[in-house]
Amino acid sequence: MRRRGIGIQGLKKKQNARSHFKQMGEQLTGERIATMEEQMEKFRKALEDFAFSHKEDIKGDPIFRKHFHEMCASIGVDPLASNKGMWSELLGFGDFYYELGVQAVEACMSNRQLNGGLVEINELVAQVNKRRGGKVEAVSRDDVKQAIKKLGKLGSGFQLVQIGNKTIVQSVPGELNRDHNQILSQAESQGGWVTSKGAEKKLGFTSDRVQQALQALLNEGQAWVDDGARDGERRFWFPYLHFSK
């Protein structure tokens, strides 16, 4: 038997059904977005009320301040986004992080010739607190990280880099590529130094690849050469690891 076609009426019904389902889908999506926006606005208002009630705790307690930043990040609020915004006026964050950023820059610049622009975050926190003196509240690791992130957005060359188990502040322009990071990570695991042959064996790199990476770190002042080892093999030391606490 010959199969009968669905006909024009059948096609129209299918088109109408598709159009109906599409409209329903768009309506549901719109309602969900509106509901989510309403919820986010309620969260922001609750966060503002919380900030107002706990203003002194946020400004005076670095641990409380860290948790407050985490709360803000969870709903997409950046209290450091504008020096003229509500958060700056409410909490004084603009002035606080501006001052902290200046102190971090000064600390990094004072040691750049020594460490090549790489400093472990805890060492930088100690240097910043030393500069601030004992008459003001000590800043935390999270405070300094927030200040460095703001400096990075200004195109200053400052950024946070994770190498091995350490968080490093890089205060010079340029990228540490994967080869650099792996060599630095190996140095971290064995007291702050590597040898060319040791890096080749440990990382599976060719001799040329290791030499290229080490030479780049030497050129930036981020590595030192030591030819005084007892075994006679040249060692490459990394000052940020030597001076980190």
Image (cartoon, rainbow, N blue to C red):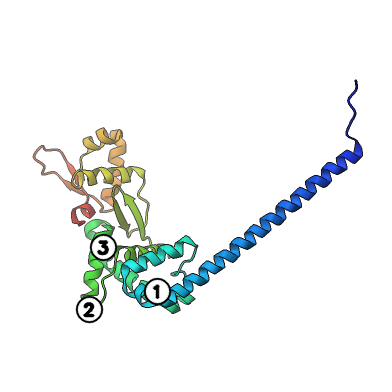
Rendering coords of residue 25 (x, y %): 71, 51
Q: Where 94 sits versus 5, above or below?
A: below
Q: Which mark is residue 124?
A: 3
Neighbour class for label 1 at 10 Å: few (<14), some, many (≥20)? many
Query: For this view, does 71 lie left or right of residue 194?
Result: right
Residue wearing tag 1:
93
Rendering coords of residue 61 (x, y %): 31, 71
Along the line of sight, the residue nearer the viewer: 169 or 6: 6
Instruction: Count the marks.
Output: 3
Along the line of sight, the residue nearer the viewer: 128 or 208: 128
Q: Which mark is residue 135?
A: 2
State the CA–CA distance, disc 1 to disc 2.
20 Å
Name the quarter where the N terminus is drawn.
top right
Mark 2 is on which residue type?
Lys
In terms of sequence position, does the residue under pointer 3 or pointer 1 come before the other?
1
Q: Residue at the location (28% across, 49% down)?
A: 165
Rendering coords of residue 133 (x, y %): 21, 75
Q: Nearer the viewer, mark 3 or mark 1?
A: 1
